[in-house]
Amino acid sequence: MTRKLRIGINALYLIPGGVGGTEVYLKQLLVAMARKPRGHSFIVFTNREMGTNIEVDSPAISIVETGVNATSRPARVLYEQTGLVGAARRAKIDVMFNSGFTSPLLLGRPNVTMIHDLQHHHHPEYFKASDLLAWRFLVWASAKNAKRLMTVSEASREDINAVYGVPLDRIRAAEPGFEPEFLTLDRRKIEPLILCVSTLHPHKNIERLIDAFADFCLKRKEYKLVLAGMRGFHAEAIEKRIDDRGVRDRVTITGWISRAEVMALYAKARIAVFPSTFEGFGIPVIEAMAAGVPLITSDVRPMKDTTGDTALLFPPNDTAALADALEKLAANETLRNMMASRAKKRVTAFTWERAATIALDALEQAAK
């Protein structure tokens, strides 16, 4: 029988509404692990911004508020490598789960570290020069230091192996899940609405979506586009593209919104689009699938692995192909219904319970 563990959860990176899909991942994973904790207890180390607001109520979970200001990346990184080590020892943890790419290297306890993707390696142009050197070193060092690594897709697992040389048997892919409520959304009041749930960062390819949408609207004037997600550092460029293409009255940017508000948008969207050029996984893909919203996404891994034959794929650098895909779905209700039906069947393989099982297995193995 596996001994009961005190599992530390390094949540220092998690700024509510400020880190995109990695926030959804950790919070939902915690819910699933706390639901079936296997007798383990979880000590969550939070920052000043998060405080006690982890949105998980379970006797298996306790919170240590560190008070570190996570909006200052240097302060957070320094604390992670120093103060967190002391806090973890005082909490008598047996193993640390680091869910945000980096870990306390001198912890003296086994680390299990989550590396969602290697965007900093493949697309350094999207990072500030002042951050990139530290980012590269800390992720590399955390990969080498960890007793086990986790990631969010088989594509990222293979990438980590290729770039860092970490053996595949030390890396586990724990694909995200979705809240069961997505499967039962009331979609009786669908509108001519195209929904893109995405942070407004350069690699999300939103400017291309704006261009394709503007071309599509020359014929389909009744459609609206909603961009739902964290504004990100590319928001100004996207706002400019909206104005340049003359679709300001047709495009809404919501900023970060609650999960209930996200579900409400899926309930009425006729089409979902996820045009990203690079992802570790792409949680909005399975959300759209579970909600039964016909999906268009980029023809790149891991999105094509996830969707199979349930979505329309387009080359991520081809605006005309994206506009054509929008028109194809808008014009064909039979196709939309068929795709939604296929997606709902396929998406049942992706659950937070499965992700939690993989995470707990990795933590138990690391603690041996």
Image: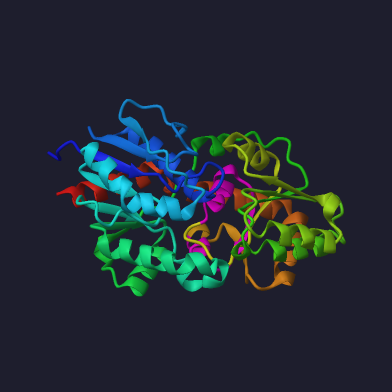
Residue sitting farthest toward the left: 1
* Residue 301 showing in the rendered view: no
Judge from the rendering whether residue 263 lies leftward or rightward of residue 360; answer left or right. Answer: right
Q: In this view of the protein, can residue 243 be seen by the observer?
A: yes
Please name whichever residue, 98 or 246, is drawn nearer the observer in this view of the structure: 98
Q: Does residue 276 appear to the left or right of 172 in the view shown?
A: right
**Number of numbered labels in the structure image:** 0
Above/below status of 225 relative to 206: above
**Residue shown at the point (58%, 67%) measured from the top left:** 277
Residue 192 in the magenta stretch? The answer is no
Above or below residue 119? Residue 5 is above
Q: Residue at x 64, y 36 (%)?
A: 261
Q: Is residue 278 above or below residue 255?
A: below
Direction from residue 267 to residue 307 in the image, left or right: left
Q: Position of residue 150 (x, y in %)?
A: 34, 56
Residue at screen point 40% across, 42% down: 29
Q: Position of residue 18 (x, y in %)?
A: 55, 47
Between residue 103 and residue 39, name the one nearer to us. 103
Image position, residue 110 (x, y; %): 21, 52
Q: Relative to the observer, which residue lies in front, 20 or 279?
A: 20
In this rendered view, identify the residue nearer to me: 249 or 357.
Answer: 249
Q: Which residues are magenta?
A: 282-305
Q: On the picture, is 221 further left or further right than 47?
A: right
Asked where in the image residue 322 lies, by quadrant, the reply is bottom right
Q: How is the image coloured?
A: rainbow
Task: Check the picture and name the quadrant holding the N terminus.
Answer: top left
- Residue 45 at x, y = what percent? 36, 40
Q: Is residue 304 magenta?
A: yes
